[in-house]
Image (cartoon, helix red, strand yellow):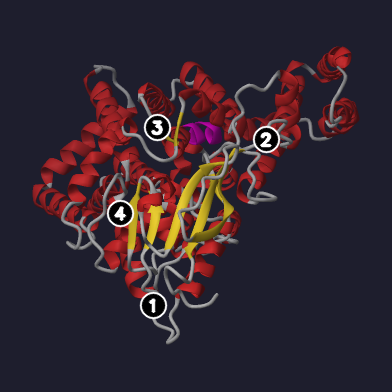
């Protein structure tokens, strides 16, 4: 009698809840933050192509442009519409560990999905018009299907692997790097001469491909056709294939959101402390102690992505995502192994009591640290007080662990310490995620993602549209001159104006409407003769450089930045009625 498996299991239900939570975090208030310069450039390229305004320019993701081109042409352009594909990709990527649980382990798969769903970087860049998370989705899909093809060489798995590879290569540079690392690692395993299950699986997969050459050729042709169609926006953008190949040099090209190597490492250390700690410890343990080849491949992939990103002269802020993908898989594997250890060896009747006993001794010093760092101007002579509190905290923790170790053994003490550290890092990760996704105001106290565009820009653009519409309700016909330092953000938000010129100095223009640029701490430029207007916020950004240890502690705990954010303002000048006759506002 055949045994029927349940359609919905507890494990599947947990994955469903994780994906649902990820979707909510990525889709709620998706259009609330205004598009930054990098986002606006991607969205404006798709809008111009959809409205016949010309071919895209500058670096862009062909796949993201193709999707937004089709979306704008069918449903209209908007901030949420431009961000919908990265948001959906950010939620979908959390489901892929389910098909990798053979190598991650069942607890490891759930842990990986949870880390992907709640990672501050993954959540933040899933809410941006950026290809990094889309590329990560297809790259992880290629890895998933490739590992399953090694397990059983079913032809359809090869077809799906090539399809995901074609979409990934058309989306961004992360898949190109993964393909190079995967091929290189496979060659090393095959020609190493060592007998292993992985080597035999690779050789068996190659023999299966050679034995069915017709299917292999058909699959490669399908992948090539899909790559060309997606890259060229279904042949509306003939330069798309070249743009896809240009992605190989994206880390060597200046972008509006480029960050320094130091800030890049700070992003990993500050926002992804949990994933970084688990990933590095897991890689060392899985590779050195267990000789895990899958973990070795993930480690090689992580190191390659990190080295390429750090050696590049410039790097986009979202370049942290290709580094985080293998690191998150390693972190999930390590966390899964730790959960397995607790299930097998945990003393459930005694260990939780010791953890509950330890919590007051941890919370108490933490509250004292909080009280100290929240003082507006703590006296300089009290600078040693915080250090003393931290020393007491370490002594209390060591005493508790020594008591646990003497009564229940060293393994129990190690597990207890690990649980406490994971709880602290996990709470910090959740708070960081909430801070970058749902800021209290548009004045940033975070540095993830670079400069933030003020929400006033979108509101001012709507007001200008209302003022610019003529008396019959037609589209505005006024010429708008925009300072080139304010593009492409203003080009996106003024896309309804058919006549826009960009200039390095709008003072020389005679357009009825001028948008000028100025730093916040500079004197306002004098308006051209015959114009009136006002100053407004354009961008804000916070730079953590220059903070001392007390400032870093205060910011890390409460996101209270002692230094003011840098600001960029803009000026809107209207021609007086005597020079031009705009309709009354």
The residue at which mark 4 appears reads as 63
Please tell me how crowded label 2 is: few (under 14), some (14-19), or many (20+) other residues with Cα within 10 Å.
Answer: few
The residue positioned farthest toward the bottom in the image shown:
472
Q: Give neighbour class at mark 1: few <14, some 14-19, many 20+ (Cα, 10 Å).
A: some
Q: Which residue is mark 1?
A: 475
The image quarter containing residue 554 is: top right
Precedes in sequence: disc 1 or disc 2:
1
Q: Secondary structure at mark 3?
A: strand
Q: Which residues are magenta?
A: 327-333
Q: Nearer the viewer, mark 3 or mark 2?
A: 2
Q: Secondary structure at mark 2?
A: loop
Residue 315's disc number = 3
Which residue is depicted at the point 33% across and 57% down? 501
Q: CA distance from mark 3 to mark 2?
A: 25 Å
Image location of residue 276, percent across then percent down:
56, 28
Q: CA distance from mark 1 to mark 3?
A: 39 Å
Secondary element under disc 1, as helix, strand or loop, is: loop
State if disc 3 and disc 1 touch (CB < 8 Å): no
Which sits earlier in the primary sequence, circle 1 or circle 3? 3
Name above or below for residue 66 compared with residue 520.
Answer: below
Q: CA distance from mark 4 to mark 1?
A: 31 Å
Disc number lying in front (4 or 1): 1
Sequence-earlier tag: 3 or 2: 3
Residue beneath label 2, please? Answer: 564
Q: Secondary structure at mark 4?
A: helix
Residue 97 drawn in magenta: no
x then y, percent, for residue 538: 54, 50
Q: CA distance from mark 3 to mark 4?
A: 20 Å
Quarter of the image that includes the C terminus? bottom right
Q: Earlier in the sequence, mark 3 or mark 4?
A: 4
State yes or no: discs 4 and 1 in contact (Cβ < 8 Å): no
> Do residues under tags 2 and 4 come within 8 Å of each other at their CB atoms?
no
């Amino acid at each position: 009698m055949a045994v029927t498996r349940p359609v919905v299991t507890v494990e599947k239900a947990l994955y469903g809840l994780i994906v649902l939570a990820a979707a909510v975090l990525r889709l709620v208030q998706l259009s609330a933050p205004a598009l930054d310069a990098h986002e606006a450039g991607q969205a404006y390229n798709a809008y111009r192509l959809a409205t016949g305004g010309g071919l895209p320019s500058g670096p862009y993701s062909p796949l993201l442009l193709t999707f937004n081109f089709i979306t704008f042409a069918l449903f209209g352009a908007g901030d949420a519409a431009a961000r919908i594909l990265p948001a959906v990709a950010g939620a979908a990527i959390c489901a892929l560990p389910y098909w990798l649980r053979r190598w991650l382990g069942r607890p490891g798969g759930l842990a990986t999905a949870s880390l992907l769903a709640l990672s501050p970087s993954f959540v933040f860049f899933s809410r941006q018009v950026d290809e990094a998370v889309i590329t990560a989705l297809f790259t992880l899909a290629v890895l998933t299907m490739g590992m399953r093809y090694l397990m059983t060489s079913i032809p359809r798995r090869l077809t799906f692997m090539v399809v995901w590879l074609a979409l990934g290569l058309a989306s961004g540079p992360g898949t190109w790097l993964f393909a190079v690392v995967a091929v290189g690692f496979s060659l090393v395993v095959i020609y190493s001469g060592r007998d292993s299950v992985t080597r035999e699986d690779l050789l068996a997969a190659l023999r299966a491909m050679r034995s069915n050459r017709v299917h292999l050729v058909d699959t490669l042709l399908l992948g090539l056709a899909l790559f060309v169609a997606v890259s060229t926006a279904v042949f509306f953008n003939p330069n798309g294939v070249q743009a896809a190949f240009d992605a190989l040099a994206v880390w060597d090209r200046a972008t509006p959101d480029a960050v320094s190597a130091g800030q890049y490492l700070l992003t990993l250390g500050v926002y992804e402390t949990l994933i970084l700690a688990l990933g590095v410890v897991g890689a060392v343990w899985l590779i050195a102690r267990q000789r895990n080849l899958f973990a070795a491949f993930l480690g090689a992939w992580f190191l390659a992505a990190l080295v390429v990103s750090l050696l590049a002269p410039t790097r986009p802020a979202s370049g942290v995502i290709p580094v985080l993908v293998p690191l998150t898989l390693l972190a999930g594997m390590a966390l899964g192994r730790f959960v397995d250890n607790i299930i097998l060896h945990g003393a459930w009747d005694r260990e939780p009591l010791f953890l509950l006993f330890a919590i007051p001794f941890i919370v108490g010093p933490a509250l004292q640290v909080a009280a100290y760092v929240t003082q507006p101007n703590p006296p300089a002579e009290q600078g040693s007080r915080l250090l003393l509190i931290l020393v007491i905290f370490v002594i209390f923790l060591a005493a508790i662990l020594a008591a646990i170790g003497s009564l229940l053994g060293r393994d129990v003490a190690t597990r207890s310490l690990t649980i406490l550290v994971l709880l602290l890092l996990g709470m910090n990760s959740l708070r960081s995620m909430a801070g970058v996704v749902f800021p209290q105001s548009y004045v940033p106290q975070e540095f993830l993602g670079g400069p933030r565009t003020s929400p006033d820009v979108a509101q001012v653009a709507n007001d200008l549209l209302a003022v610019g519409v003529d008396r019959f309700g037609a589209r505005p016909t006024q010429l708008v001159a925009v300072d080139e330092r304010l593009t492409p953000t203003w080009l996106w938000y003024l896309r309804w104006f058919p006549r826009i010129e960009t200039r390095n100095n709008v003072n020389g223009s005679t357009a009825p409407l001028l948008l000028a640029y100025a730093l916040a701490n500079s004197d306002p430029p004098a308006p051209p003769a015959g114009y009136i207007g006002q100053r407004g916020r354009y961008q804000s950004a916070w730079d953590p450089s220059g903070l001392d240890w007390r400032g870093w502690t205060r910011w890390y705990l409460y996101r209270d930045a002692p230094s003011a954010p840098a600001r960029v303002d803009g000026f809107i000048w209207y021609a007086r009625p005597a020079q031009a006759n705009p309709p009354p506002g």
